[in-house]
Structures are given as structure tokens and as C-alpha cells.
Image (spheres, helix red, strand yellow):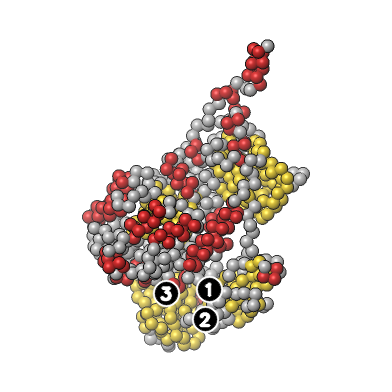
Amino acid sequence: MKKLLFYLVLSSFPLAAQKVNPPAPYGALPSPQQVQWQQMEYYMFIHFGPNTFTNQEWGHGDEDPKVFNPTRLDARQWARTAKAAGMKAIIITAKHHDGFCLWPSKFSNHTVRESAWKNGQGDVLRELSNACKEYGLKFGVYLSPWDRNHPAYGTPEYNQIFANTLDEVLSSYGEVFEQWFDGANGEGPNGKRQEYDWKLFHSVVFKHQPKTIIFSDIGPGCRWMGNEAGIAGETNWSTLNTDGFGMGAAAPSTSVLNTGNENGKYWIPAEVDVSIRPGWFYSPDTDDRVKTLTHLMKIYYSSVGRNSNLLLNVPVSREGLIHPNDSTRLMEFRKTLDASFKTNLARGKAATASAVRGKDKRFAASNLVDGNYESYWTTDDAVRQASLVVDLGRPTAINRVVLQEYIPLGQRVKSFRVEAWDGSKYVQIDQQTTIGYKRILVFPTLKTAKVRVTILDANACPVLSEVGIYKAPELLSNPEISRTRQGVVTISSDVADPVIRYTTDGTEPTMASTRYTAPFDYAKGGVIKAKAFIKNGAESSETIPASFDVAPANWSVVTTDNASRSAANRAIDSNPRTLWQTARQEGSSKHPHELVINLGESLSLKGFTYTPRQDGQTGGTIYQYSFYVSENGIDWKPVLENQAFANIRNNPVKQEVAFASPQQARFIKLVALSSVNEKEHWASAAEVGVMVH
Ligand code: FUL
């Protein structure tokens, strides 16, 4: 009898279940450090240096080191802020393109030692690495090999000098979790470029920090994802083919960096680097332009939500502190993230799958809802399609689904669909391509009792760690402020029945501020701040600021080469979606190119603005330029000669260039001297404007 029972018990489990093995890893795989790195998800970038004090994005390297003089520097405040924001680490620009070292380097004469700060006795890396330890944050360094200060840059000796510099940093401040290499390779003080010896640089990094993740365009630890706007590809493979490629201009195209290569040879996951302000460095001009909470949430979903880590730049101010506008926004961001992902509605619910590997419990669908990344659901080797159902028990309001692959076994899923049960059938919520370490789907709130995830295609049997289902708070959408060429302002909102209030004196709109009812004239310009209210002010949007200068209502284009004047009018039509560009034919289109504008009246100009094309392309975007003014359109006075729009290729935001002193003028002339794309000889602009306020 005993024997029979034993036999029955045994036979009720398929024999295979006893010895089914986990699936074999597929394709390129992450190192254990890369898995740990991916699990950090979100950390802080800090841009800080002489640029902080000079309103520049790319310092020239000839700045007086004495300009670096933060009055109240407190690295503990930075670390405290990062920690409170939910971040896991801080990476700082130890040396940016201007060559200035935030530590007293033996290998440079352009450092904190030569600055006014702490009488030359300070060391920012020491203070920050200590603060990171105190707050349980990891510490990382950005070092630019491009050095516009070092006299040896552009000579063979410089590679060893840069290697020594790395050696110094990486052996002095404890563990460095990430070494951030900027691929930029411009000219140095002697007008020459350096041929970087990356092999040497990497060997120094790994000598001191064998576990560090090296960031660059092409890794090897993690890769740039192709833009500075915070938007990783919807399809995002953590694998990349880098054989034959290099950094900077030699890197794979930005669109490839954005999506990775399916079945790429190496595991080089994406990192999104984006600034909380329009530029990377602090400027008092951008105190009011900290990205909105809504914008930061969008960035979170297009970075962490698309299989990327998020490296969010928070520039330290001239005081040496994180400005309250940035830290307030970071706290709102943290609060919204917590509220969104606090309760996983799928946790512990019944989960079933159309197929389970060897019918073995170890690989069952219940692993998807256990909150443990290490346990996973998978199928037999031959399976490429399978579906999973999470039963929430009763109709539940949801608006986010989070999926995670178990990446130690590789990235496998090529496409999947998510559906909600409407009581009688499944209705599609979304269909997407890759998952990777984490994929977050965002959709309008719906009520459902069951969510079905169907893997539609995969490179090998799917292996998923977790399925999360959430109901995130809905943010009231923000008003949008726009102005026509004639100077008429419209404030729109897609909220039902909003009450929009606005101010023009820089103050925060309240329920007592002017109510927006119809478009109004604002041709002279200034700052408008608008806010949408509902339920008698009980709920409100964020405050949206917009600053306008004098409207180009009466402006006209006087001359421009190789393009019709009407096309050139697109540069002064107040619509950044339209474009002026010079002809592109070979020969007929060589730099310089000029755009002459008649302002219709004589104005006292504080500066000018240039908005590069906003369509994601870089063709014709101006890099070097000169700017002239005139009262009569005949006699021209140079105001700025041979200047450059720093970092405009990667960060194509509106450029605001202030003059050293106001210039009275009725005519302006922008002369394009070169393009951001070196071999290209034509010019383009979305908008050109002036600053009088
Ligand atoms: C770029 C640099 O040129 C920018 O100034 C900034 O540091 C950004 C993070 O990387 O390549």
C-alpha cells in the first residue's frame, strides 16, 4: 500500500519536472556589475566649475581660475538632496572641457588650488566623496579628455598626462562606481586636436577601479543613448555592436545609440543623461526654467521606463549649493514617483501562464508577482509566444504596467502586447517591442479585473522576473502659452473647464490673479506665468512660465544668400517648427552665410537669440558665428566675432547670447561661419530674435 501511494504521488508529477534546467543564457550578457548598475536606475549628475560663474556651457580654458569662488559650498547639502530625491549616486564633472580640475591636480595649473575658493586649499572631490559615503550614495566622476587649457593638449605627451590625471582621481577618493568619459574632441589651446589613447585610459581606470562602469558613446560599461533630451528609444536593446566604432564622431549613429542593436555583440546598456535646466551648468538666467514635474515624469517614463538608467543633472549654483528651485522640484518628483509606484496591485495576486518550463513550479507565473527579481517565469526552450494573466480579483482602476526581464540570462523579448479584461473580452492597452531590465507602459486610467500580457515574439524562450500593475496619481495637465508673430498671446489647456490665471509681474499666479478669457496683446514682451485651477482652486496645475521679447511683428528680412526671402521669413515667424535654410547644392553654398533683419524701429538690444532647428535633425545648425548691428543697414558694427554656440549639436535649445553692453540698432546681421556638422556648408535656423528686456 505504502509502495503504491509512493508510486501514485510520483506519477502525478511529470518526471521532467524533477530535472528541468533553467534556460541557457541568450546572446551578450551583463556582468554582475552591470546588473547592479542597472538596478540603481536613477542618480544625480552635477555640472560645476568656472562655467558656473561665467554663464558658459563650454569654457574656453583661458578663464581666470579666480572666478571659481563658491561662497557657501556644502557637498553634504548636495548629497542630502540627492538622497532625499531617491537617487542612488552622484557623478560630478571633475574636469570639463575647460580643463579646470575640481581637485588640486599635480598635472595641471588650472585647478581649485589656483582659485579663490578656500584660498586654494579646497578639494571638491574630497568633500563630495566624503558626503556620498556619509549619505550611503555611490560616487562617480566625469572627466573630459578634451582640454582647452592644458598646454600639452594636441601633442603626444598629453595622453600620458590625461592618464596620470585619471590615475590621480581614481586612486584618491575611494570607490568610483562609474567613470564618465565625454567623447568630445575639439581643439586645444594650440589649435590642435588630440588623438586619444583610449586603451591607455581604460587600463588606468581598471587598474584602480576594476568594478567601475565606464560610460562613453560606446561603453564598454554603458552607452550614451543619443540625445540630451531624456528620450531613450521605445525599442531599446541593451546590446550594441561596437567593433570598428569609436567615440564622438566615430560612434554609431545617434539613432543606433538610441535603440541599441538587436543581437548586438556586447552588453552595453543605455544611460539617459539630461539636465533639470536648459543647460548643463548653473546660470541665474535659468532659475525660472527648471523642468516642470510633468516634464520630469515624462523623462522618467522615457528613460527608466524604457530600459535605461536616468542620470539627472542638477547644476550646483554660484553659492556652491543646489538651488531651492531645483531641490523643490526634485522633492515633488520623488513624491510623485513614490505615490505612483508605492502599491503594486499585482503583488501576491493569482498569476497564470499559457506555458511553464517543464511544468516546473520553480518557473511558474507566480514568480512574476512575488516582488523578487531573482525568481522568474519562463517556458520550454522552443517557445516564442506565451501569455500571462494577472487576476486582480475585482475591477480595479489602473494606469501603469511594469514588466521586467531577468537580464542575467540576456535580453530576449522582441514584441509584446498588454490587454485588459472588460468583463466579456480582452481589450488591447498597448503593443510594444522590447522590455529589457524594466519597461513601464503609461495609459489612461481604466478599470479591469484581469491584465493579460502576451509575448508575441522573442529571440529565445522568454524569461520574465516581474509584472507590476499600478494606479499612479493623474497630474492636472499644464497650460500652454504661445504668442503669434503679431504679439498675441494664447493660453490653452486641455483640462475640462479650467480657470486659467496668469501674472505678468513674475509672481506666482493665485486664484486672485487675472483670469485668462481671450487672447491678448503682448507685443512688447515680458514674463507670463500661468496656472490652471479646477474645483474653485482645490486642484491646480503647475505654474508655467514663458518669457517673450519684443514681437517680430514689423520685422523683415533684408538679405540672405541662397534662399528666398519668404523662406528666410520663417526665421522670424515666431514658429520654431518652421525653418530657414540656405541652399544645399555643392559649390553654391559655402560659409559664411548671413541673415540680415530690419527690426522696423531702433531698439536698445541686450543680446540676441538663435533657436536651432527643432525637428530632431542637425543639418545646417550654426556652430560658429559673428553678430553685427547697424542703424542704417549700411554701416555695420561687429558686436560678437568668431563666437560659438557651445554644445548646440547635442543640446539644441534656444541660445540666448547677451552682449557686453547694450547696442542701439535697427538692423541686425547674424553670420554663420560653420555648421555643427564639420563637412557641411549650409546654415539653418528655426528662429532668430533679440533681447531688449
Ligand atoms: C557633453 C558635453 O559637451 C556637455 O557640456 C555636457 O557635459 C554633457 C553631459 O556632455 O558631451
- Decide if residue 198 is in sight here: no
Q: Quadrant of residue 98?
A: bottom left
Return the residue nearer the eye: 201 or 208.
208
User: SS at mark 3?
Assistant: strand
Tell me where residue 668 appears, x and y as whole percent. Answer: 44, 81
- Decide if residue 97 is in sight here: yes
Q: How far apart are marks 3 and 2 (CA)?
A: 16 Å
* Residue drawn at point x = 43 percent, y = 51 percent: 136
Q: Name the residue under label 3.
A: 657
Binning the other alpha carbons within 10 Å of mark 3 as few (below 14), some (14 to 19) or many (20 upward) gives some
Tell me where residue 97 appears, x and y as whole percent. Answer: 34, 62
Asked if disc 3 is less than 8 Å from ligand 1, the answer is no
* Residue drawn at point x = 25 percent, y = 60 percent: 108
Left-right relation of 64 to 479: left
Label 1 with label 3: CB-CB less than 8 Å: no
Q: What residue type is labelled 3?
A: Val
Binning the other alpha carbons within 10 Å of mark 2 as few (below 14), some (14 to 19) or many (20 upward) gives many
* Residue drawn at point x = 66 percent, y = 66 percent: 539
User: SS at mark 2?
Assistant: loop
Report the disc number at residue 511: none
Tell me where residue 52 appears, x and y as whole percent. Answer: 38, 68
Q: Name the residue under label 1.
A: 570
Is label 2 or label 1 in front?
2
Q: Quadrant of residue 79?
A: bottom left
Tell me where residue 227 appears, x and y as whole percent. Answer: 47, 57
User: SS at mark 1?
Assistant: helix
Left-right relation of 399 to 219: right
